[in-house]
Amino acid sequence: MAAALFLSVGMTGREGQRDFPVDFGVRVERVPGFFTYSVSEWNMRRRSKPVFGVACHWGVRLWAVTASTLFFAVTAAQAAPQTEMAYFIGNSVTDTIGYTALEQMIEARGHQHIWGRHTIPGAPLEYTWNNPFVGNAENQQAGSGGQPGYTDALPNYTWNAIVLQPYDHRASTDYTYTSAFINLATQNPANADAQVYLMSRWPRRTSDGAGDFLPFDFRTLWDAQYAGIDNSPNDTENRDYFQELVGILTDPLATTDPGTIDDTPLELLPGDDHPSALLNKPILLIPVGDVMYELENRLRSDPGSSLSLYGIDAVEDLYADGVHLNDMGRFVVGTVVAATLYKESPVGLPSSPYANGSPFNPDFVTLVQTTTWDVVKGHPYSGVPLPEPGTLALLSLGGLAILRRRGSLG
């Protein structure tokens, strides 16, 4: 594995000017196996003779030394192997993650990914809670021992991440049963340190009586406001729904009418506590819907070019049916999950675990990975912070200091 760093120095004005701007643009990229930073430009004005001069070869020397300075400082922390133990609860939409494919993709970077799941096709969280011995259950921590299902996996094992998939229920109901799963998990005190995520899914496509899909506007559906009228998918498959749900799970008073949502009082099961009293970290989102929204923006910006370059020209091409996604769509979901759980750029991760023997278009892979990271880093609900420009600035200045000590800057 190797990393590449680019430091561009653009200088304007004439040597000897008193007002001499120097624009820095730092972009730290990686080839497979490393992290990607993208840092906006900033300006540094000097009120005296410029330190650098204006010859372009200074920029080349600055690049070389700063690259060596930043290589270890930036990539060492990001490339450190992680062990993540993640448990998933949901339905066939959750299964779109492709747990084995996700594991293979992540472990190609040197991480260890241990997972478990309890999913029931078509089931909301309420149904899964009330039917603990129905569905598909796996737990890699248990091996051949233990009992299948969440009733054993949550209280008897320690998890770094617990991912829950709300589905086809109003926020008030999903509040109750998301809280119930969290209460069960935290019967194991170690799970108070788990990061709980809601997986924000995508709008479904609808069809007419003949089974033909109706016109589909992903962006309009995703931008819709949650009304809380009923359990209609049209009301619970939008950005606002998932953000509302995170809000009340974090703070039960964080609603327009405190203590209620969709005109329904917020209620917990008997004996349960609010998640904020049980968890040491706020509940977050795995923002699949937001990544698909941005993919739609980029694909629709030039549909003709998108089709020839990526093989698709809209996110509807990622659907296998009205709800489920095809292999390319599964790759999108897995990429978002990887970037969010491991808090690092997915650029360079292998796509082959999802390709089912037919390699994806490389430009499509790059589009998915770069779009995912652009959305996930700094997303208000992902828990993945933006890179610190100040940190990179200090490291860049360290490179300048080396040059000055060597007498290269005069």
Image (cartoon, helix red, strand yellow):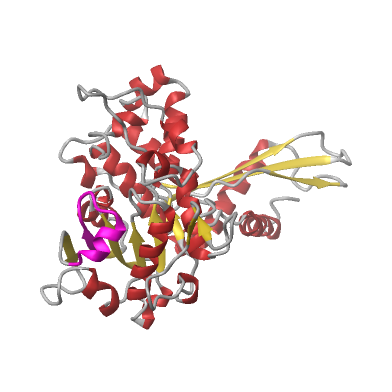
- On screen, 140 above or below 346? below
Magenta-drawn stretch contains 129: yes
Q: Foreground: 223 or 270?
A: 270
Residue 42 seen anywhere in this rendered image of the structure:
yes
- At x 42%, y 44%, the residue is 372
Q: Residue furthest left?
A: 144
- On screen, 403 above or below 375? below
Magenta-drawn stretch contains 313: no
When asked about the image quadrant of residue 341, the answer is bottom left
Q: Which residues are magenta?
A: 117-132
- Residue 10 on image: x %, y %: 68, 37
Q: How many marks?
A: 0
Q: Foreground: 79 or 170?
A: 170
- At x 30%, y 29%, the residue is 317
- Residue 251 on image: x %, y %: 54, 65
- On screen, 319 above or below 106? above
On the picture, is 53 further left or further right than 58? right
Q: Foreground: 376 or 180?
A: 180
- Residue 105 on image: x %, y %: 27, 52
- At x 24%, y 65%, the residue is 130
When asked about the image quadrant of residue 255, the answer is bottom right
- Residue 202 on image: x %, y %: 37, 41
When asked about the image quadrant of residue 129, the answer is bottom left
- On screen, 209 above or below 94? above
Residue 384 seen anywhere in this rendered image of the structure:
no
